[in-house]
Image (cartoon, helix red, strand yellow):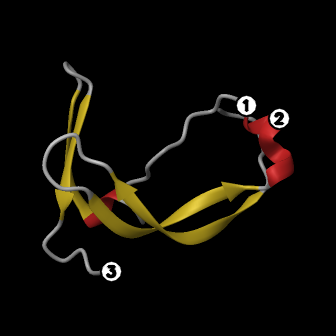
Amino acid sequence: MRGVFVHGRLSRLTLTLLADAGEDATIQTTAFVPEPDEAEHWGDMPCILGLYGCLERMRFAVDPYTERFYFGLAADSTS
C-alpha cells in the first residue's frame, strides 16, 4: 500500500512452498519482517514474494485463468 511506512528489518530465512501435487520447494530467501507493534499499520496489506532475492531462485509460472501458481526448484538453487 503506498504511503504507509512500516518499521521492521530484513531477515534471511528458509521458505518452503507447499505443493498440492508434486514436491514442495524449499529455498533460502530474504524477507521483510515487520516489528511486532506494527500490526495495526500492517493491517490487511498483502504479503509479496519478490522476484529478486526470492523467486529468481525458482522456476515458476502463473496461470491467471485458474489463479494457480506453478513452481519447481531451479537447476542451481543451492544459494
Secondary structure of the residue carrying numbered label 3: loop
Query: Which picture quadrant has residue 67?
Result: top left
Is there a contact, CB below 8 Å, between mark 1 and mark 2? yes
- Which residue is tagged 1? 43
Q: Where is residue 66 in the image (x, y as percent from the top left)?
A: 20, 21
In this rendering, is residue 23 above or below 20? below
* Few, some or many residues within 10 Å of mark 3 (<14, 14–19, 20+): few
Residue type at mark 1: give it.
Gly
Visible residue check, residue 15: yes
Query: Which picture quadrant has residue 45?
Result: top right
Which numbered circle lies on residue 79?
A: 3
- Which residue is tagged 2? 40
The Cα atoms of the two marked residues, 1 and 2, are separated by 5 Å
Q: Position of residue 49 (x, y in %)?
A: 44, 49
- Give the residue at x 18% y 77%: 76
In this rendering, is residue 16 above or below 30? above
The Cα atoms of the two marked residues, 3 and 2, are separated by 34 Å
Is there a contact, CB below 8 Å, between mark 1 and mark 3? no
* Few, some or many residues within 10 Å of mark 2 (<14, 14–19, 20+): few
Residue type at mark 2: give it.
Glu
Name the residue furthest bottom: 78
Secondary structure of the residue carrying numbered label 1: loop
The Cα atoms of the two marked residues, 1 and 3, are separated by 32 Å
